[in-house]
Every structure is written in structure tokens, then in C-alpha cells.
Amino acid sequence: TCGICVEKCPFDAIEIINLPSELDEDPTHRYGENAFSLYGLPVPESGSVTGILGPNGIGKTTAVRALAGEMVPNLGNYDDDPTWEAVLDRFRGTELQNYVERVRDGEVSIARKPQYVDQIPKQFDGTARDLLEATDERGALDSYIDRLDIGPVVDNDIETLSGGELQRVALAATLARDRDFYFLDEISPYLDIGQRVTAARLIRELAEDEDRAVLVVEHDLAILDLLADTLHVAYGEPGAYGVITDPKSVRNGINEYLKGYLSNENMRIRPEAITFEEHAPRETTKAEPLVEYPDLAKSYGDGEFSLDVESGTIYNGEVLGVVGPNGIGKSTLAQLFTGDLTPDVGDLDFALDISYKPQYIEIDQPMRVDAFLSSITDQFGSSYWNTEIANPLQLNRIMERNLTDLSGGERQRVAIAACLSQDADLYLLDEPSAHLDVEQRVQATSAIRRYAENHDATVMVIDHDIYMMDLLADRLMVFDGEPSIEGHASKPQEMRDGMNDFLSDLDITFRRDERTQRPRINKPDSQLDREQKRAGEYYYAK
Ligand code: ADP
Ligand code: ADP
């Protein structure tokens, strides 16, 4: 095996995987004998946004602690007391020299946004405003509250905020600091696309207008592309060693990553390239309908929020993508389908047996992962189940862990496995990409697709990662309206129509990278942006 998977190779490609072996050169830091080693370091630069693209567990927190001056990297000599002079010697003549000198002289101050915003309420008591006022060193608070749309919840207790609200509060709290170096460990979890784009713009403005150095880890590639000026690809073996490459242009870095081959490093990091559909998939002959549903309406309370749903058909064996902003009624529709809610208008003469993975996963039973999963399916441990579910979701390494000890990404993978392992008419996954690193997204996407194909299973996936949607969905259901007030759900549409509907609402167009056909967000009001809007082609442009 190559180290990615424990059992059979999901790519059937074991012979061509030439996984990087640990480097010959000395690491930047090694925690101890046979402990994790980090090679290379990212290069923060004032006035620019530096991205890191790679899996979790590859040493990015270690690298940031070094860059923040909280830890002197030992250059592999874990028995000696490390010194900044030695570090400086190592990086003399490189792009890092200047930065390391400033760290040595204690001149670099840092602000950081943690990866798991869900933990914030455990560390902070008070309202969002209390938190924000304590961090507003630049007097930027009002502007961030306004542009990140925090106003409606700013006087609420932190512990009552949703994941998306916490993410925006955490972002505002970090960006409002007056520091030299900002480290943002993922900005996109729980945010919808509009919010992600806004966050990306605010971060770019901080770097450009205030001349700050920003380092971001981000797994939503469309957003990373928009956000960063330069990019370090990180690879290696999570938990064992990690290599951070020299900086690349964002375009090249992402293209090489998708191709699975790093040119400068002459390193293959994945056996297969990831490719995107350049043209909208052609309408395929439809299978049998799973359900046909009429126009529906549902409102809560005295009509504080109301949803209406255009009648439509969901076909057996399709993957239906569901897109739209947060708070627009997507979960409400799911509950109408399961029969947990009754529509005010329209009759549903079916109640589908839905296997549902919610957005916020609570599986905090004191139980081991293997015991939990084998309680769900008697297929557990069969070679079929291992090939289809456990391997692509990288579960083998965490089988013996307790559910309560899992990280966000580990819990997400267990929850996806649990959802797909049940017998159901419809599999509904709400934001499966959250907390998965970019490589895990690719693997989870192919696991979900393959499951649908091999089982004639019908899958609905709600997600905000547009690359994941492109790779997953056969058709799209688009929600629009005014979040928290009213939502409209379109009938399931062909990909081209759905993307146009969705993106015109957001006022975002995508062009294609010439070399790889990868979709890239256009600069607002650029020539292509204007041309595509005129032609009404927001995603599959010629
Ligand atoms: P990332 O931020 O990319 O997820 P980290 O830098 O947090 O990665 O950790 C990389 C690896 O180093 C992990 O396997 C972690 O267990 C290990 N590690 C982190 N801190 C220490 C430490 N103080 N001693 C030994 N190993 C550590
Ligand atoms: P989405 O899944 O698109 O984020 P939801 O369907 O969860 O949206 O929620 C849509 C709106 O309905 C939100 O404003 C939410 O606060 C409100 N809402 C959801 N459930 C209830 C409920 N049980 N009672 C009152 N309002 C609700």
C-alpha cells in the first residue's frame, strides 16, 4: 500500500503511485526521534496573501508557531537548544531571511483565526459584541459588522450563534486586530458562497490597503484562487512528515495540485488528475422517477420565514446538487421530504426514507468508531464496504478511536460513512465538505458518486464548494430569496441552467483556465465578466 489507504487501492493504481518518501535534506523542525518533521516554511510577505494548499496534519500549525516566534525551529536537532541565529543561517539568502530577522528581533506580532470556530463558545463568555470590542485594535469593527452582516446577531450570546455566524465573528475579530502577520486557518466552513467571496475580499483589502502579511489555509479551491497571491503546496504523510514547497503562483500551484504532479519538485502527489466538465453534461435519458412532488409552501410561526417550492421530479440514481445561501430553507425542504414537517400548501403522499447527514454533526456518544459503524450496517468490514466506503473516506486509521476524540474532519468522514451505510430511498448530505481538507474532499466526492452509480442510489448534496458540486452533481436545485425571511426552491434543473440561475443571483461569473479548464472566478467588471453576463453564461462559458 502507498500510505494513503490501508487496504485495497481505491484508484486501482498502486503500481503508479510514487509517493514521496521522506526527504534527504534536514527538516526545519523535528519534534523528536521518529516524531513528526516539517520541511520548508511558508513565506509571509507584507502586502500580500500567501496560501497553503494541502492536507491537515502536515505541519501548518507547527510552521505558524515558528513564524509567530512562539517556537524556535530546531532544524532537526531535537536534542540541542535551538537558536534563531542557526535558523537565520539556514534561511540566509532566501526569501525568508528578512522575515526571520524580524522574528528574531521580536518585531512580528500575530493575529490568528482558529480552524474550529465551534470551540469559541467554550473559551469565551459574552456577546459577539463583547468579543469584537475586545479585539478591535484598528477601529474597523463597524465596517466588518456591516460587510459580514453580523449586525442581526451582534448582541446575542456567543453560545447561541450558528457555525456560519461564529465563522464571520471570528473572522471580524481577527482582521480587526492591528498586527503584522495574520494567520487564518480556513475561512469557508459554514459560509455560503456569497459570504466566502466577501470574506476573501476583506482579507485581500487588509493585505493590500494596510500592507499586512496574511497566511491562509483554505480547502475551497475556487475561494483560495480568488484570495491568494502566492501559494505553497504542502504534501507528505499526515502525522509523519510534511513538506511545504517554495512559493508558486496561485494559478500554477492549484493546477499542479489538481494534476497531481508538482513540476519544480518533480513530485507526484496523486496517481490521477482531477478534471472538470468544460461543457455542461448532456441531458441523459432519465431513469424512473423516485418522487414527483407538487408546488409546496411552508412557513414558521407568524410567517417569520416562508418557503415555497416549485414542483419537480427527482430521478432514481441521480446526484442532485442543492445550492443557495444560508438560512434560505434548504433544511426545511429536507424535513418536508422526511415527513418531519407538514407543508401548509401542497400534499406529499409519500414520506421518503431519508438517510440524513446534518450540517452540524453531533455523534458524541462514548463509543469507538468501529462499534458505531458496525451498529449501523451489517456490511461493516466486508471487502465491498471497505472498498466503497472505508478506504476512500480514510476510516481505517481512526476505527479504534472514540467518537468523542475525533477532530472535525474525522467526524465528518465518519458521518458521511454512516449516512451512506444505511438503507434508504434518498441520501441527503448537508455540507459534506466542511472540515475536510482538499484531498479528502476529492476522495469523499468520488466515494459519494461511486456509491450513487453502483447502487442506483439517489443522493441530494447541499454544499457551497463549487468545485465539489461540479464534480458531484448531475442536476441542480437552486434556492434564492432573502435569507431568514423568504426562500424559493426551483425544480431540479440541468447543470447549465442551474449554474446560470445560481451564479447570476450572486453576480459571479467563472472563466476557464486555459491549460486545465478549471473554473476560476472572474474579477468583477473585467471584460470576461461583462461579456459572460451579457451572454447569460455564468459557468459553462465557451
Ligand atoms: P496541521 O496544523 O497541519 O494539522 P500540526 O503542525 O498541528 O499540523 O501537526 C503536525 C504533526 O506534528 C501532527 O502529527 C502532530 O501530532 C505533531 N505534533 C504537533 N505538536 C507536537 C509536539 N509538541 N510533539 C510531538 N508531535 C507534535
Ligand atoms: P438553510 O438550510 O437553507 O440554511 P433552514 O431551512 O435551516 O435554512 O432555515 C430557513 C429559515 O427558517 C431560517 O431563518 C431559520 O432560522 C428559520 N427556521 C428554521 N427552523 C425553524 C423553526 N423550527 N421555527 C422557526 N424558524 C425556523
Image (spheres, helix red, strand yellow):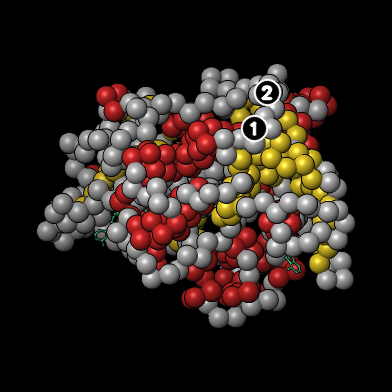
Tell which of 387 and 36 is nearer to you.
387
- Residue 324, image x, y percentages: 72, 47
Q: Which residue is drawn at 39% across and 43% down?
A: 385
Q: Identify the residue at image location x=45%, y=56%.
A: 376
Which quadrant of the render holds ligand 1?
A: bottom left
Q: In this view, does 54 lie to the left or right of 498?
A: left
Mark-to-mark CA distance, 2 and 1? 9 Å
**Residue 42 can be seen in this image:** no
Few, some or many C-alpha atoms within 10 Å of disc 2 (few <14, some 14-19, many ≥20)?
few
The residue closer to the viewer here, 11 or 181, is 11
Task: Give the image quarter of residue 518.
Answer: top right
As drawn, 29 above or below 250? below
Look at mark 2 in the image and give the residue it sits on.
284
Query: Which quadrant does the C terminus fall into?
Result: top right
Q: Earlier in the sequence, mark 2 or mark 1?
A: 2
Vertical comparison of 158 with 352: above or below? below
**Cβ atoms at labels 2 and 1 below 8 Å apart:** yes
What type is the residue that disc 1 sits on? Asp
Q: Is mark 1 on a helix, strand or loop?
A: loop
Position in image of residue 296 (x %, y %):
84, 52
Looking at the picture, how far across and down is residue 69, in whole percent? Answer: 34, 60
Spot the residue most to the left. Answer: 79
| Residue 382 position within the rendered picture, expressed as x and y whole percent measured from the top left | 34, 44
| Front position among marks 2 and 1 | 2
